[in-house]
Amino acid sequence: MTDATPTKTRMTLEEFKALPESNTFVEFIDGEVIVSPAPKDPHQEASIDLMRFLIQCQCTDEGTLRSAPTDLHLGADVVQPDVFWVSGDSTNCILGQDGYWHGGPDLVIEILSPSTAKRDRGRKYRLYEQHGVREYWLLDTVADFIEVYHLENGRFVMQDIYGLDETFTSPVLSNAVIDVNAILKH
């Protein structure tokens, strides 16, 4: 069985904002509404393990940690990162009076799925880069690695690719040591 392909519809940002609130994974990128199927269990397990790790390491205490489905407005686009973190002193990403987050968070983490990997590595990668996301992680639950990028002079630079039994340091999270096994070992 293959993953379902996201459905796409064109509309304006105003029409998108008028849609009723839901728990469906819906993004608005380049004037296109993209509805994705619910993630499969390995994706959800990685998301829970990731959130648990970030909370337990207390590296996100001085900010706000969110997981999908949470709308993040980046200019005229609206995305739903799997996980994002905004530092307590961030001026780049704020919770607006409309109840949504606006601007690039300090850290964005996407968990790759067959139906979203191209978008996570393409359009969303460029959006996060353009909006000043300081660190971007791509988790692959099949190949068991985390690809880490950091923003340097307005462009993402690959820090490295980390596999099981490896750790890495996250400058954005006060140099916290990130244990790949704690997030991806199943």
Image (spheres, rainbow, N blue to C red):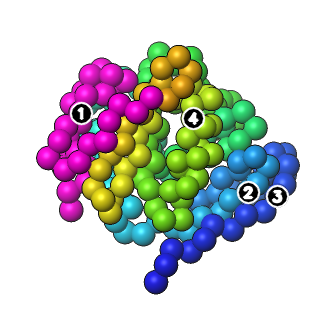
Between the residue at mark 4 and the residue at mark 1, the CA separation in whole angstroms equals 21 Å
Are the two marked residues, 3 and 2, in contact with CB atoms closer than 8 angstroms?
yes
Mark positioned earlier in the residue sequence (3 or 4):
3
Q: Residues within 10 Å of mark 2 (few under 14, many from 20)?
A: many
Mark positioned earlier in the residue sequence (3 or 2):
3
User: Element type at marker 3?
Assistant: strand
Between the residue at mark 3 and the residue at mark 2, the CA separation in whole angstroms equals 6 Å
The structure residue drawn at horizontal position 45% and vertical position 48%, both measured from the top left corner, is 110
Residue assigned mark 2: 33
Image quadrant containing the C terminus: bottom left
Q: Amino acid at mark 2?
A: Val
Between the residue at mark 4 and the residue at mark 2, the CA separation in whole angstroms equals 18 Å
Quadrant of the image occupied by residue 20: bottom right
Q: Which residues are magenta?
A: 157-186
Between the residue at mark 3 and the residue at mark 4, the CA separation in whole angstroms equals 22 Å
Q: Nearer the viewer, residue 76 or 58?
A: 76
